[in-house]
Each structure stands twice: as structure tokens, then as C-alpha cells.
Image (spheres, grey):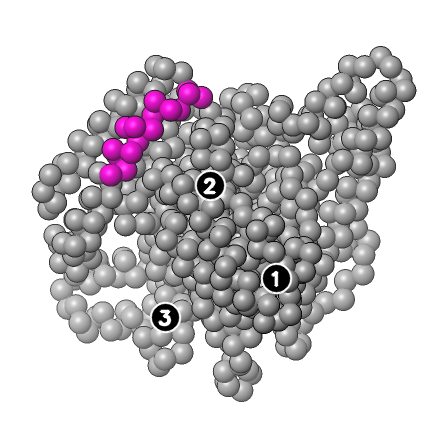
């Protein structure tokens, strides 16, 4: 079972390729991070790259081999596990030589850390015997950060044999990815994101590695990324009844986050955290009572009361004051900092063009788009290389992607066999259909522009990783898509790992736009924009929102505003004049909400 890091932050998954090898860059410093394991082809190429770099054997796993996807994922995770362990061993061997990684390890820890306190004593002591004893103690205490993986539950495409016959469910994309993780040597967690997948969760129950042993030990853990308490309760209960324990509920803002945005019905992050704060013990007790019979049926006797139940949060963090407030007031166990790490080349894979665009991006350059074939709003960078390439191809009469990987082939409107809405095949077929249905040029153009807006994320979200490691794939575009959260607009400095960690802990300030609103108020503004967009769509075509939806959304936002009005005085990490400004901004946002038509005030 991995021991918890003394760091109070973690790096969430960043796209498909941006954090795919981040553990090799940060784990030895005790920092937790999450890798996507959706693209086994990328993982196989990176395994080859790192095996050669470290002089290790590389037995390739070909596409046509039995269970290739799961085995590739296992092999990559095993390699990451080995290399991180080797890094820690080497770091300890080098000791406290000048400029060593061991020095970096302890200087980056939060100032309240017990190990940091011992390190400071060691560094300032003139007692050689004490220094030697403390160096030995500190060296033994240096532990790697947890290495976790992410599986989007919705990306679970059915696969087919070469003869066109559907393969059994365990060969679905997410099922195979889970098997790859379960069979690896990694002692981390799997983060299930994007909502509930009952078949996948049922499959998870077949792995003993995910179930607590009699002594309460968890070889591998489950983390649920959730949007609210209700989602946590529903998914947690489903898993508990199958004898699976959720070790962490990772709350993510519905809109103030990177990647795909799973908006709530206007329920804001503050009230969501408040519910977790008030009902955390209830969650532990209820999950334990549901899990115990399932364990006993398997002859297991683990005591659910002894199992960890952590609550963490991520989405829109930008200041040390926010970080500390979340930890103090809501008692969260860790806080996720994602998008700002896209500006840290030491930690993530970002190509030079994309890095410059991210550094220069302002509020209007990061927007909620419809480019994802998943059909879910997607936070996007304006004029990304992939979007520019996409438009150039369309202007040349070659709209759409070849769709070699098919991870997002989820649309079944033609022939029943899933297809990706960003693919050439789908777009060409849809264009023929639109020409027949929409003879008016302006109507056709509007529908066509919407159609070709979809981007190939399978290629776009791994292009930077390939570029940074000088890896080429046959007919793979090197134009990158990137999915930063809106919060990145307030950062522009390309920072070192230590600088970003120091910013998180309040030891320096990397914010370049001091007008940045508080994270809670930023999210509220995003939800008001989202609500206005839905109301505009409803007014235009009457199909995007019902009156019941509008009333519920409006009421939830109003309740959130009332909650924040009471909460702001408790944010003592901020100066009084900052809290006063927050109250003024909250009133302005309330007026914006009142101005949204359709719903009576």
C-alpha cells in the first residue's frame, strides 16, 4: 500500500499525452500525479523510448497479438514502476551532495512538514554527529509520490476481430485498460472519471487486487472523480455492493477545469464541498455497511471502518490562499493543480508552439468548445495547432480525420457500427445528407461549419508527447490539441518545477494577472455564461432546455450565491480588503444572473 505523500497537492491527468510520463519527472520528489492509459499505442512507443534510453530490453507487443492492449498497458506501467524505484534508489545513493535531488526533495516540501523541519535542523546544525544521524533518517523517509492512472469510463468502445466479429466485453477499451492496470506491479490508484459505467464497475469486481485484504491492505486503490455528493453516493454504493472500496472521492469543478467539462445543474463547488464536509462520516459508514456482506461472501473479513476515505478537490486553483482555505475549512486531503503545470516543461509534455500559445493566452483564448467527438463540452485553446490544421484541411476539401485509433468511435447513427464524428467517413456521409436536406446555402453552411468543428483528439492530445520525445507514428499528425482550464489565463510565466511548487505553497507568486477572480466566483461566472448559452439555444430552437431545467438551474445558482455570501467572511486566508472585493464581485454576478431572460426573479 503506498504511503501518503507529505505534499498537499496532486497533479491530475492532463489530456492523453501531457502527463503520460509525469511520474518519471515528479514522483521521486514525493509528488503524486495521474497518467492517462487510454492510448496503448502511445504507451508502447514510450516504453520503447524509455527502454532504449535506460539500456533495457524492449520486447515489442504487436497490434495483432493476443490481448495486446491490456498487455501493452501492463508493460508500460511496470516500466514506470521500475524506473521510479530506480530514481529513488539513485537519489538516496547520491545523498545530500550539493544540488542533489535529495536536497530538492526536502526543499519542495510544504513548510509545515515534519520532514521539512528535520531537514532545516540538519542544514543549520554544526553538530556533525547529529547531522549524520538526521541525514540517515531523512534519506530513509524520502518516499516517491503515488503514481496513479486515469480511465474515462465512457471511452469503452466495443472492439472487433479481423473477421468483423464483436469481441467479448473484456476486450472493450476501458475494460482492457483496467485489466492492464490491475495486472501491473504499480501500487497506485485507478481514477474512474466521466461518470458511471456499470459493466466496467462489475468487471472491476473480478480483480482481487482492487479488493481490501483481511488486514485492510489495498494493493491497488479506486478513486472516483465526481461532480457532486449524489454522484459519489450512487457510484460508491454500486461499487461497495460488489466488495470494492472507494479510497478517494475526487471532486472536480464542473466548468472551471481542464479537458471535458461535465457541468452540474447549477450546483456550485462551494455547496458541493459543504455537503461532503457535513456527510463524510455518513459516506464512510454507508459504504462500509454495503461492502461488508460482499466481502464476507468471499470469505474476507476486512473492517471497513479502518479503510481510508479521502476527499480531494480540483479545478480552478490559482493561489496559495485558496489552497490553504480548502484544506482548512473543508478538510480536504489534497488539492489538485492541473492546468498551471502545462507551463512547467520539467513536469509535462508540451511542444514549443503550444507552450507559447498557453503562455500568451488570455481569458478569451480559453473557451468551452464543441470540438470533442464525445459530445461533451471541451475546454479548448483558441488557434491550437490542431484546430488550425483542421480548418486548413476543410478548406482544401479534405475535412475530417482518417480515424486510425477509433477510441472515440461512439456514434451509431449509420449502420449500427460505431463511428467517430470527427472522421472523414462520418463527415463525408453527413455532408451528402445535409446537401439533400438543406438546399439553402446559408443553412447548409451553418450546419457544415458545426459538423467540421469536431477535432481528432486521439491524434491531437498525444502530438505534444510524440514531439517532445522525437517519436513518429505512421501518418500521425503532429498538430496538437490542448485542453487547459480557464484558470490558465492568469498564468504566463514558463516555470520550473520548484517555482510552481513554491507558488502552490505561497513561497512565491506566479500569477501574472492580478485581476484574477477567486476560484469560487470564477466558477459562478462560468456557470452564468453556460446558463445564458442554454437559454439562448432554447429561445432559438426550443430543444436545448426545458422550463423545469431552467428553474432548477437558476435556483441552484441563487442558492450558491447565498452560500458564498455567508462563506466569504470565513476565508481568513485572504486580507479583509480582498474579502470585501469578493462580496462586491458576488453582487455583480448576482445581477448578471438576474439579467438572464426566461426565468422570473
Of callouts 2 and 1, the N-terminal one: 1
The percent coordinates of residue 267 (x first, y second) are 30, 45
Q: Height in image: 376 above or below 254?
A: below
Of callouts 1 and 3, the N-terminal one: 1
> For mark 1, does the 10 Å Cα neighbourhood hold few (<14), some (14 to 19), or many (20 or more) residues?
many
Q: Is residue 468 left or right of residue 374?
A: right
Say what secondary structure mark 1 lies in: helix
Q: Height in image: 270 above or below 535?
A: above
User: On the image, numbered disc 3 is attached to which residue?
Assistant: 411
The residue that appears at 50% across and 86% down in the rendered structure is 165
**What is the spatial separation of the Cα atoms under label 1 and label 3, in whole angstroms?**
32 Å
Q: Nearer the viewer, residue 62 or 424?
A: 62
- Residue 435 in the magenta stretch? The answer is no
User: On the image, numbered disc 1 is attached to which residue?
Assistant: 210
Q: Residue furthest right?
A: 129
The percent coordinates of residue 248 (x first, y second) are 53, 49
The percent coordinates of residue 129 (x first, y second) are 90, 20
Q: Is residue 243 left or right of residue 560?
A: right
**What is the spatial separation of the Cα atoms under label 3 and label 2, in whole angstroms?**
30 Å
Magenta-highlighted residues: 559-574
User: On the image, numbered disc 2 is attached to which residue?
Assistant: 314
Amino acid at each position: 500500500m503506498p504511503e501518503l505523500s507529505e505534499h498537499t497537492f496532486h497533479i491530475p491527468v492532463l489530456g492523453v499525452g501531457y502527463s503520460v510520463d509525469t511520474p518519471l519527472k515528479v514522483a521521486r520528489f514525493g509528488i503524486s500525479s495521474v497518467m492517462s492509459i487510454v492510448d496503448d499505442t502511445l504507451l508502447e512507443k514510450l516504453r520503447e523510448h524509455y527502454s532504449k534510453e535506460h539500456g533495457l530490453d524492449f520486447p515489442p507487443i504487436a497490434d495483432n497479438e493476443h490481448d495486446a492492449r491490456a498487455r501493452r498497458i501492463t508493460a508500460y506501467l511496470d516500466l514506470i514502476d521500475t524506473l521510479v524505484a530506480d530514481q529513488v534508489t539513485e537519489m538516496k545513493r547520491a545523498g545530500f551532495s550539493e544540488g542533489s535531488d535529495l536536497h530538492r526533495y526536502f526543499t519542495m516540501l510544504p513548510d509545515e512538514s515534519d520532514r521539512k523541519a528535520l531537514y532545516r535542523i540538519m542544514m543549520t546544525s554544526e553538530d556533525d554527529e547529529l547531522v549524520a544521524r538526521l541525514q540517515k533518517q531523512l534519506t530513509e523517509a524520502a518516499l516517491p509520490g503515488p503514481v496513479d492512472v486515469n480511465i474515462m469510463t465512457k471511452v469503452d468502445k466495443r472492439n472487433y476481430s479481423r473477421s468483423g466479429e464483436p469481441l467479448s466485453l473484456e476486450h472493450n477499451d476501458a475494460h482492457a485498460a483496467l485489466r492492464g492496470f490491475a495486472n501491473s506491479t504499480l501500487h497506485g490508484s485507478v481514477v474512474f472519471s466521466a461518470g458511471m459505467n456499470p459493466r466496467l464497475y462489475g468487471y472491476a469486481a473480478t480483480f482481487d487486487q482492487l479488493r481490501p485484504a483481511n488486514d485492510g491492505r489495498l494493493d491497488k486503490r479506486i478513486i472516483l472523480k465526481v461532480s457532486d455528493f449524489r454522484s459519489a453516493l450512487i457510484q460508491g454504493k454500486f461499487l461497495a455492493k460488489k466488495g470494492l472500496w472507494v479510497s478517494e472521492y475526487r471532486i472536480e469543478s464542473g466548468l472551471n477545469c481542464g479537458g471535458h467539462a461535465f457541468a452540474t445543474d447549477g450546483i456550485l463547488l462551494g455547496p458541493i464541498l459543504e455537503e461532503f464536509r457535513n456527510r463524510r462520516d455518513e459516506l464512510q459508514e454507508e459504504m462500509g455497511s454495503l461492502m461488508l456482506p460482499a466481502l464476507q461472501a468471499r470469505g474476507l473479513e476486512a473492517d471497513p471502518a479502518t479503510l481510508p476515505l479521502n476527499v480531494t478537490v480540483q479545478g480552478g486553483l490559482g493561489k496559495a490562499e485558496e489552497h490553504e482555505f480548502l484544506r482548512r475549512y473543508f478538510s480536504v486531503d489534497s488539492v489538485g493543480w492541473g492546468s498551471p503545470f502545462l507551463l512547467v516543461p520539467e513536469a509535462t509534455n508540451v511542444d514549443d508552439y503550444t507552450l507559447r500559445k498557453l503562455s500568451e493566452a488570455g481569458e478569451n483564448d480559453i473557451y468551452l468548445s464543441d470540438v470533442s467527438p464525445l459530445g461533451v463540452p471541451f475546454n479548448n485553446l483558441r488557434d491550437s495547432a490542431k484546430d488550425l490544421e483542421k480548418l486548413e484541411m476543410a478548406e482544401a476539401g479534405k475535412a475530417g480525420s482518417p480515424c486510425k485509433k477509433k477510441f472515440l468511435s461512439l456514434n451509431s447513427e449509420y449502420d449500427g457500427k460505431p463511428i467517430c464524428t470527427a472522421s472523414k467517413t462520418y463527415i463525408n456521409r453527413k455532408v451528402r445528407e445535409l446537401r439533400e436536406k438543406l438546399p439553402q446555402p446559408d443553412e447548409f453552411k451553418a450546419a457544415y461549419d458545426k459538423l467540421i468543428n469536431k477535432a481528432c483528439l486521439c491524434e491531437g492530445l498525444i502530438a505534444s508527447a510524440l514531439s517532445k520525445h522525437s517519436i513518429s507514428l505512421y501518418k500521425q499528425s503532429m498538430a496538437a490539441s490542448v485542453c487547459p482550464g480557464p484558470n490558465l489565463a492568469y498564468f504566463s510565466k514558463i516555470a520550473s518545477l520548484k517555482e510552481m511548487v513554491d507558488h502552490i505553497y505561497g513561497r512565491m507568486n506566479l500569477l501574472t494577472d492580478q485581476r484574477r477572480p477567486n476560484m469560487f466566483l470564477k466558477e459562478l461566472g462560468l456557470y452564468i455564461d453556460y446558463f445564458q448559452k442554454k437559454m439562448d439555444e432554447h429561445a432559438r430552437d426550443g430543444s436545448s432546455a426545458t422550463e423545469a431545467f431552467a428553474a432548477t438551474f437558476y435556483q441552484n445558482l441563487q442558492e450558491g450565491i447565498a452560500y458564498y455570501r455567508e462563506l466569504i467572511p470565513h476565508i481568513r486566508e485572504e486580507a479583509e480588503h480582498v474579502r470585501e472585493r469578493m462580496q462586491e464581485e458576488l453582487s455583480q454576478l448576482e445581477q448578471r444572473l438576474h439579467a438572464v431572460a426566461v426565468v422570473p426573479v
